[in-house]
Image: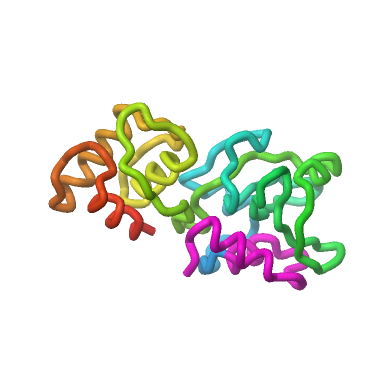
Amino acid sequence: MTLNPIPALRAAKKITKGYGGQCLAFVRTAYGVPSKYASAWEAWEHSRMQVKATTLDGVPRGAAVFFAPKGSPYGHVAIYAGNGQMITSDSATNKVGSQSVALWQRAGWKLVGWSLDLNGQCIAGIIGHNYKIGAAGTRVRYAQAHLIAAGHPLTLDGIYGTATRAAVTAYQRKNGLKPTGTTTRATRKLLNKER
């Protein structure tokens, strides 16, 4: 299983054909996530780690980006490649490749956000730093996603505030680690396994 945005993005770029009308299957394949939901929209609606957004601000490379249904109940999902591009399947051509998010939006598809879980599996990147109160950004969101996967209710806001510190402390206590409230090396090692 890949379950990590950057390797999933690399895997997606190697896929060049197939998946016409099966965007969720394409994204699942890139991530190595098993089948669970029938459509991209159903996967979005069941996501526990979604970040609702109508712009690409703050979307990490490799994240699953979701679009509202357009003329059908199925919606669309692709893998964000950065710089306004996504790797996506195209039902009209049965090909997979890089396309502009703006092109899809001009065609009437509404970006609804991005998610760090897919079909119930955490697909957040690896936590690589010792975060503490005041830290912010995508990497903090990854830490929050891993904590959510471990059963701690949090908001994926990307801010290492008191709620995130409390969740880290609880996680550390539950796993026999020193309760520092920061993402120490031992804490990161365990959290990175939470899927």
Tell me which residue sits at (72%, 43%) in the image.
84
Residue 37 placed where, x, y %? 57, 60
Q: Quadrant of the C terminus?
A: bottom left
Q: Give the color scheme: rainbow, by chain, secondary structure or one colour.
A: rainbow
State which region is magenta: 1-30
Query: Which one is nearer the viewer's eye here, 115 or 13?
Result: 13
Query: Which one is nearer the viewer's eye here, 144 or 58?
Result: 58
Residue 129 placed where, x, y %? 35, 45
Question: Is residue 157 rendered to the left or right of residue 28?
Answer: left
Tell me which residue sits at (36%, 27%) in the image.
134
Tell me which residue sits at (80%, 61%) in the image.
90
| Position above or below: 39 against 143 | below
Number of marks in the image?
Answer: 0
| Position above or below: 16 against 127 | below
Tell me which residue sits at (38%, 44%) in the image.
143
Residue 125: say if magenta. no
